[in-house]
Image (cartoon, grey):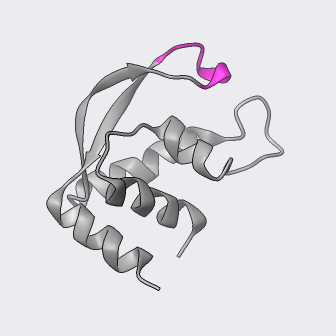
Amino acid sequence: MTDLTRQLATLVAAGDDFTSDDLTTIGAHTLDAAHAPNGANNGIGGIFSYAAKLGRIETVGYSRSRSPHRKGGLIRVWRGTASGRLWATSVLRP
């Protein structure tokens, strides 16, 4: 299991709305830190798409990104689903 999977599970389990900014901020994680200026975070969208396809998260709106490299561009706001919260609980179980 990757760090990003655990971080996404943490966001889902919290029950609050979240964005991709929140996922990368939690662990200050990038997919490729050597790649400037955005750390190759364009792969983060794939993580969200896959989780949505599995029914773990759902789109609830849009927001302006807080990440400097996004320059206020629109990003989706997500919320964990009931099945997503069950998944998150199993992922975060010690």
Q: Position of residue 66 (x, y in %)?
A: 56, 23
Q: Is 74 situated left or right of 38 in this image?
A: left
Q: Who is closer to the viewer here, 35 or 8?
A: 8
Image side of residue 73 versus residue 90, left or right? right
Viewer-proximal residue among 80 and 73: 80
Q: Residue at x 41, y 53 (%)?
A: 11
Residue at 23%, 71% (x, y): give it.
86
93 vs 82: above or below: below
Residue 79 lies in what quarter of the image? top left
- In the image shown, does 52 or 87 lie closer to the viewer? 87
Indicate yes or no whether the magenta region holds residue 72: yes
Examine the structure image and report whether residue 14 is included in the region drawn in magenta.
no
Residue 3 quadrant: bottom right
Q: Position of residue 47 (x, y in %)?
A: 44, 53
Task: Write the residue at 78% across / 46% down.
Answer: 33
- Residues rendered magenta in the picture: 67-73
Residue 64, position as x, y percentages in the image: 45, 17
State the residue lying farthest toward the bottom: 94
